[in-house]
Amino acid sequence: MISSIGILLTWVGSLNLIILFFSNNKKIFQSLVRINLLIHFMLFCLLEIGLFLDDFSIYYVANHSAATTPPIYKFASLWGSLDGSILLWNFVLSIYFYLYIKFYKSTTEIYDIKIFALIILFFNGFTIFSSSPFAGCVQLASIGCQDFTLLPFQDLVISDTGRGPNPLLQNHPLMAIHPPILYLGYIGLVLPFVISTSELFNNYKDENWIKVAEKATYFPWLFLTAGITLGAAWSYEVLGWGGYWAWDPVENVSFIPWLLATAFLHSSKTQIKEQTLINWNYVLSCLMFLSVIFGTFITRSGVLISVHAFSNGNIGTYLLIGLVMFTGLFVYIGIKNVNYFKSSKKVEHLFGRSGFFVANNIVLSASALIVLIGTTYPIFYESFFSKQLTMGRSFYDILVGPLLLILIYLMVFSTRVSKVNLNLKDWLGQNQNQINLSLILSIIFTVYFNASYKFIITIFGSILLIIVISKNILIRFKKTKLQGKYWTGQISHLGVGIFAVGLIMNVTQSYSNEIIISAGDEVNFGDKEFLILSPFEEIKSEKNVINLPIKFNNKEKYASLNIFKNSSQQAISSPAVFRNIESDTYVTIKVIDEDKYKLIFRENYGIFILWLGLGISSASFLTRIRK
Amino acid sequence: MKKYVSLFLLLFLLGLPSIVYEDNDSRYEKLSKSLLCPVCQGETLFDSPSEYADDMRGVLKEQIANGLSDEQIMNYWTLRFGERINTNPHDTNPFLLLIPIFLGALFAYVFYKKVRND
């Protein structure tokens, strides 16, 4: 029943979008956009109802949920696999369509409506023609469902019990919020794409398009940052390997749009103030969204292996068609505007505001390019040499690391930058005390942590950044409130400086040790002493958990091993984390051999400082969204 | 005066690592971080909690204890699991680094040329 209603409603939704595409009347398309949002909201609710009622006649529910799945993970199952996540994708696109009409639409032209409708229609098409989360089950598998139908009112078979979500996805509540938040950021980059293409499609363009596009990027940028951060936190809390970023392909393809969006937020300002970089801003505003589709293509088509890999199906081909289509639109409109782009002014002062933004954009875009190359290398390598290739962490450390270091120094010198060239001598004179204080702190840092050559330059830059900005804020704070765009940027940069210090501490100081113990043993790790208590087993409906209590300073935490029922996958180890400002002690169970436990103790430095910096950076943008 | 203090402090800072820094990463750590766990999804031997990786770590520790060189150890693993087990392929194939460096520099050059008033 739910299956049929869902499929019919998807058809109605697409029909509505087709009418929307051809409608020219303001009143009509405004109502149709609202109806579109309502339909996608209903589709979202409908699948949730299916999940909560354990309607195993639905292919998706039978394969990605189970009767024993706890409610929060039933809710999250909607985006736990490909078909459902496309439903969420379309719902988020519809939300943005509505927000666009309400807050951002500034012209009376209707190309934007047409382009937006076309984009949602395109993704809706996938659920109609290829695979739908509402597809009914027509053939059972041993557990779950084997085959499906895309038509309503068919004779469906019902499986007894569902297969349940991927164990990794039902191990921590963060999983329930990380994907939707990330989607709000990732997909939100459709806004600048629609705004710049539709505005430049016009022959009488409004010069304000860049302001609208910039404003529309804040919201997605904030959610993309929060989503990536939550993903990192999830990885740290759940995956049990003690890290937060692995340069995994799916992480990379969320990082590429983030780098481009960050570049755009900077470069748009020079166009607004000095009419420079107009062509580049057009490219960037589109590239953000195109990189989102490209990223989804390479990670969802099955050409790459990653922790995030979903089932493939023919989504690859479909996304490739979309990518070609939207890139075509971008190129066509670009060519159409060659003369307009020529009106872009040249950058006069290389060490003035525009110059800094140019440098920032070169560094951020080059980083995006390198991450893209690293992510796609394995694909090219395999097609040319028929050999598989793995690009690990050090590739990115070697190439992206130095670029991020340049960014830190750019931020240091851009604390007081005007239209004309920065006078280095004046700058040094004004900041003499801050420089000396930073040098002293860097020396203390270096001695305390035994830091290497590689890192002292970064350490000094980050500390200098924090101190220079903090001093500015303190002086300013005494006089007036912190207002205006300048301070949003500065506080955000302050967060980056703090983040960088945490990152350096984490990369250079963390250490780990494998320890084999029995219950009742005392463990000395670093200069800390841990007591291992007796383990006990917890039997839940969806999993069995072996908990090993570990005691430190009167705090007791469990390192546990989760063994999921209905799953062929290996057991998942959840860490016990003893948090501290300087460093976390992170304990995971690696192997249980009768009454012996092989534990990994890790001392992870700088984690708290890292989150703090990211938090400050993101929070600085909250004030900008309202305007 | 303050300028000289800065200069002195800077030189002192730059000289410091040669006194205080020592490389604590063991060979085991370096090697296990550059080998991929073949049954996991994108995790290195060092990171992976799987039992299979644990067995492999055992073999790796034995190899180090037996005094095999880094090259011998990497050869052993790539022969059995293919090149994809090496997560640092750029160590032996510098083109993997040179291509992105060249493209990045080209991008920066073109960008600079386009925005400058020449």
Image: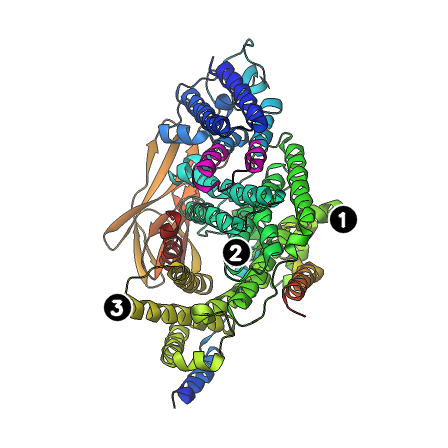
Vertical side of B91 occupied by B13: above or below: below
Q: Which residue is drawn at 61% across and 65% down?
A: A346
Q: Check disc 3 and report its element: helix, strand or loop.
A: helix
Q: Residue at label 2?
A: A268
| Measured Cα–Cα span from mark 2 to mark 1 | 42 Å
Q: Which of marks 2 and 1 is in front?
A: 2
The chain under label 2 reads: A
For marks 2 and 1 on the same chain, the one whose residue lies earlier in the sequence: 2
Q: Which of marks 3 and 1 is in front?
A: 3
For marks 3 and 2 on the same chain, the one whose residue lies earlier in the sequence: 2
Quadrant of residue A203 within the rendered picture: top right
User: Disc 2 residue type?
Assistant: Ser
Q: Locate residue B44, reporting x and y percent.
A: 55, 51
In this picture, which residue range is highlighted in magenta? A92-117
| Measured Cα–Cα span from mark 3 to mark 1 | 64 Å
Mark sitting on residue A478: 3
Label 2 Cα neighbours within 10 Å, binned few <14 / some 14-19 / many ≥20:
many
Pick the residue in front: B58 or A538: A538
Residue A66 visible in the shown view = no
Mark sitting on residue A385: 1
Q: Check disc 2 and report its element: helix, strand or loop.
A: helix
The chain under label 1 reads: A
Q: Do labels 2 and 1 share a chain?
A: yes
Pick the residue in front: A597 or A503: A503
For marks 3 and 1 on the same chain, the one whose residue lies earlier in the sequence: 1
A321 vs A471, left or right, is right
User: Disc 3 residue type?
Assistant: Lys
